[in-house]
Amino acid sequence: MIEQSVKIELETGLQARPAAQFVQQANRFSSDIFIEKDQKRVNAKSIMGLMSLAVAYDEEILLIADGTDEEKAIAELTAFVKE
C-alpha cells in the first residue's frame, strides 16, 4: 500500500469534468484506489464518492493505492491533479 499527499493544482479542483476524467483514469488500474480529505475516505473509482469530497483548488488530499500497479497509479493520478 502506498500513500501520497498531494496538493490540487487544477484551477477548477476536482469538480465536474476533471472529476470524471480522474475517475476514468483511476479505473484504468487494477489496484484499489482511495482519496482521503478531512478524514473522509472515498473510492477514487466512484464519481459520486469523489464529488462528495468537493475537492477545490489548492486543497490537500491523500491518495492511497493498494495492488499490483499501485506505484504507477499514484504517479499518474498525482500528475493528473498537478496539470
Image (cartoon, rainbow, N blue to C red):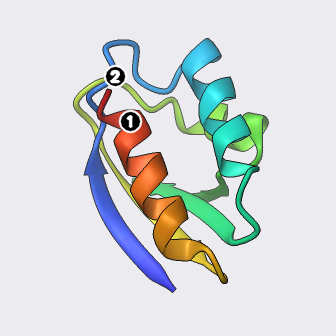
39 lies above or below 80: below
Dot 1: few (<14), some (14–19), or many (≥20) neighbours within 10 Å? some
Residue toward you, 9 or 58: 9
Residue 45 at x, y percent in the picture: 74, 49
Residue 38 at x, y percent in the picture: 40, 54
Q: Residue at x 36, y 43 (%)?
A: 79
Quarter of the figure with the C terminus: top left
Disc assigned to residue 81: 1
38 lies above or below 7: below
Q: Is residue 29 left or right of residue 66?
A: right
Residue 41: quadrant of the picture: bottom right
Residue 52 at x, y percent in the picture: 64, 35
Dot 2: few (<14), some (14–19), or many (≥20) neighbours within 10 Å? some
- Kindly state the secondary structure of the residue where label 1 is placed: helix
Q: Is residue 60 visible?
A: yes
The residue that mark 2 highlights is 10
Q: Please state which amino acid type lies under the numbered disc 1.
A: Val
Q: CA distance from mark 2 to mark 1?
A: 6 Å
Q: Is residue 39 visible?
A: no
Q: Residue at x 71, y 43 (%)?
A: 49
Q: Is residue 62 left or right of residue 77?
A: left
Q: Residue at x 31, y 14 (%)?
A: 11
Residue toward you, 48 or 69: 69
Q: Please state which amino acid type lies under the numbered disc 2.
A: Leu
Of mark 2 and mark 1, the one earlier in the sequence is 2
- Is the C-beta separation of discs 2 and 1 under 8 Å? yes
Disc assigned to residue 15: none
- Kindly state the secondary structure of the residue where label 2 is placed: loop
Q: Residue at x 69, y 26 (%)?
A: 20
Residue 31 at x, y percent in the picture: 69, 72
Count of number-bearing discs: 2
